Amino acid sequence: MKTDYKFWYIKRDDDGFITQATIRFYEGEVTTENEKGVPVTRYRRTKRLETFDDLQHLKKDGIVKGLKEVNGKVAVFYNQENFGQIKTDDELRDFLNKELEKDKSREPIEEQKVK
Amino acid sequence: MATLTVFPDPNVEVSSVDGFAEISDAVWATARGAATGGSASDSGGVYSTYCAADLNLGTYTITRTFWLFDTSALTAGATISAAVASFAAAGGASTNADTTAMHIVASTPASNTAITTADYDQIGSTTFGNITIANWVTTNNTYNDITLNASGLAAISKTGITKFAGRLALDLNDVAPTGNNYIGSGYFADNAGTSSDPKLVITYTAPAGPANVKTFNTITLANTKIVNGIAIASVKTKSGIA
C-alpha cells in the first residue's frame, strides 16, 4: 500500500515565512485505468487517512498531536514548532517527506520519498 | 503582506475539487449553449486539452475547466488585496488558430466535490483575468499565472469555497472558432506529488488581533478584538471612571 500527502493550504507571514501548513494524507495504489479512452498507469488515491490509527507518524512518544477538524473537515496542521523557519514549498516538502517516512506500514510514492 | 496558497482537493475529495466538462457537436451554438456536457472528469491527473474551443473536421469541441478552492482559512475579517491563479503545464503543445486566450470566470457546479456533465453550463460570463494561448508556457511542470482583477478578488470566499472555471475567449464571447484552439496539456490536483497542482495565491491582511488600550494611571482599560469581522470592545472602569 502506497501513501502520499497533498497541501490544502499554506500560510505565510509578511516576511514570507511559512507559518502554517495544512495537509491531508492518502493511501492508494498504482493502477491502470482508461482515461478518455486511453489506458493510463499512475498512482490513484483510494482513501483519506483521517484517524490516528491511520496516521502513525503523528504518534510521538505515545503523544498524539497534529490532527484537527475544521468545519467537519479533518486535516493535519503543522506550524513552525514542527518545521522551523522555512519559506519555500520545497523546504516544506522535505519536512513532510520525512514525516511520511515515519509510517513504516506504508510506502511513500516515488515523488515523496526522502532523497 | 501575508499570503494564503490554496489547492483543490484530489480524489478522494473533502471540500473542493477540480476537473473538466466538455462537449462536441457539429453546430457551434448547440455546443456552446448545451445544458449538459458530453463527458466530464474530476479524477484525472492531466488532460491533453486543458481548455478548448476547437473546430476539427467539422466538429466543434468546447472544454471548460473547473477549479474549486477551500479558502475558508482566510476567515471573514480578512482584507484581500491581490490574488494569482496558477496552472501547471504538462508539456503538451497548444494550438491557437484564432489567436485567443483562456479566461478565469465564476462557476457553480452542483457539488463542491464533484464535476459532472451536468456542470457544463454552470459557468460565468464575467472575466476575472486571462492568459493568452500565445503566452501559455507549455514546458512540463511550469506554472502559468493569471492575475485576478477586482471582480475576481470579489469572488473569493473568505469563509467557504471559491469556485472558478476556465473557458476560452471564443467560448466566452460566442465567436465560433475557425480551427484548433486549445491550451496544451495541464495538470489537475489528482496528479502525484505537490509541485504541479493548480493553486490560488491570495495576498491579504489578517483580521486585527486583540488590542489593548490603556490610559495613564490605569484609569481605563479597553480591549478590542475582531470576531467574524465585527469589532467587539470591552471597557472596564477603574475608580468609577470609564
Image: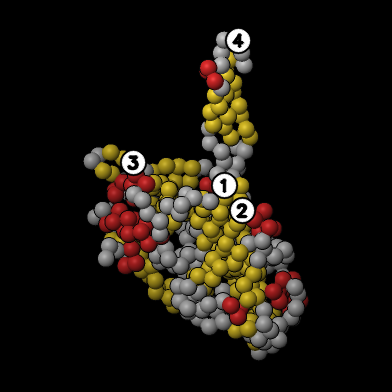
Residue at x 60% of width, y 80% of height: B134
Q: Position of residue A99 (x, y in %)?
A: 30, 53
Residue at mark 2: B81
Q: Amino acid at mark 1?
A: Thr
Which residue occupies 71% across, 82% down?
Answer: B177
Helix, strand or loop status at disc 4: loop
Instruction: Specify whether B24 is left or right of B192.
Output: right
Is circle 4 on the same chain as circle 2?
A: yes
Task: Give me the disc on residue B240.
Answer: 4
Chain letter, disc 2 residue? B
Q: Which residue is mark 3?
A: A65
- Distance in Å between CA atoms under marks 1 and 2: 8 Å
Residues at marks 4 and 2, CA–CA distance in whole angstroms:
44 Å
The answer for how far apart the CA atoms under marks 3 and 2 are is 34 Å
Pointer 3 local density, CA inside 10 Å: few below 14, some 14–19, many at least 20: some
Asked if labels 2 and 1 touch by Cβ distance under 8 angstroms, the answer is: yes
